[in-house]
Image (tube, grey):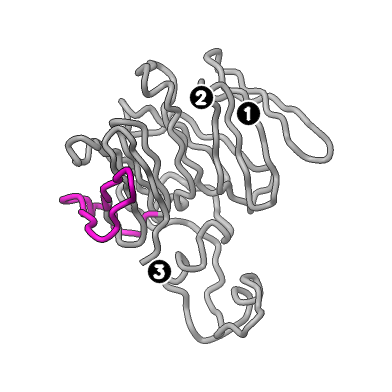
Amino acid sequence: METTALLPLAKNNVLYSAGWSKEIIAYKDRPEKVDVEQPRVWLNSKQHTEDILCADIAFPYLVTGSYDGMLILWNTETEKELYRARSGVKPRVEVPVKRAPSRQGDSLIEILQRPSSHKLSSRERGRMSPSRLHHKPAPQEDHAPVDTLLFLKERVTLRTKNLPHLISSEGGFAVFWDIFHFSRPRQTIRLTRYPNETVLGLATDPLNTVLISGDTKGEIRVFSLNSTQNLNVSLSSQKIQTMDCIVP
């Protein structure tokens, strides 16, 4: 079982993990060591039907995202589900339907492009990292896998109204969520300049004034987040470029 998220919570002296088991597991974080020999699984935490690909934490909240596009918001104090977004619809992902056994030294792309009589299951697609496969933008009824999750922790702490508190990366898009009205996203914008790339890394500053994304093309983009709903985007590459977008 692959582990896809490790989340330390110093306030409770605990380390949380999640992944293909579809569960949230807690380890006691002792001063001298993390107790990995006596893990404790959250009761009723196996709510995802597909593998958990990412998670983030902002006390007292923890959020998990899975391969089918489902997001679940949890309370770390009660260890119970608070809200969920989407109901586990199969994702729209461009994948080769056939492959052959890999040979030593073959790259991931060579493995994916080689024909065979074997169809890829969703589990096998996950093992080859859905983030490296080409995602399609999600239509109304289908969703791309949730590649990355990022809490805007300053906004969560202040319980800021009318602004998003959480960002998910899905098929190259940033999806903005209000965790206090979690049923539908506030807005979605493209983070990548190229349609078949995805964002694997998201970061922000302590005051949540900027958003930084890194994608599978190797580009880093810097976004300015502010309360006026204007977003200036600067691309970190050999030539710096800027553009204007509208985001919550």
- Residue 62 placement: quadrant: top left
Residue highlighted by disc 1 = 223
Can residue 51 be found in the magenta stretch? yes
Mark 3: secondary structure: helix
Q: Earlier in the sequence, mark 2 or mark 1?
A: 2
Q: CA distance from mark 2 to mark 1?
A: 14 Å
Q: Say whether residue 25 is left or right of residue 204.
A: left
Looking at the image, how many numbered discs can be counted on the residues?
A: 3
Q: Which residues are magenta?
A: 25-52
> Which-is-in-front pick, marks 3 and 2?
2
Within 10 Å of disc 3 (Cα), the crowding (few <14, some 14-19, many 20+) is: some
- Can you give x and y, in whole percent of width and height, for residue 11 in the image? 30, 32
Residue highlighted by disc 2 = 206
Mark 1: secondary structure: strand
**Could you tell me the amino acid type at mark 3?**
Arg
Proximity of marks 3 and 2: CB atoms separated by less than 8 Å: no
Q: Earlier in the sequence, mark 3 or mark 2?
A: 3
Q: Say whether residue 247 is left or right of residue 49.
A: right
Residue highlighted by disc 3 = 123
Residue drawn at the location 67% of the way across and 36% of the way down: 221
Residue drawn at the location 74% of the way across and 36% of the way down: 236
Within 10 Å of disc 2 (Cα), the crowding (few <14, some 14-19, many 20+) is: few
- Can you give x and y, in whole percent of width and height, for residue 145 in the image? 45, 53
In this rendering, the answer to whether 175 lies above or below 100 is above
**Could you tell me the amino acid type at mark 2?**
Pro
Mark 2: secondary structure: loop
Q: CA distance from mark 3 to mark 1?
A: 34 Å
Q: Say whether residue 147 is left or right of residue 64.
A: right
Q: Please tell me which residue lies in front, 58 or 112.
A: 58
- Can you give x and y, in whole percent of width and height, for residue 25 in the image? 27, 53
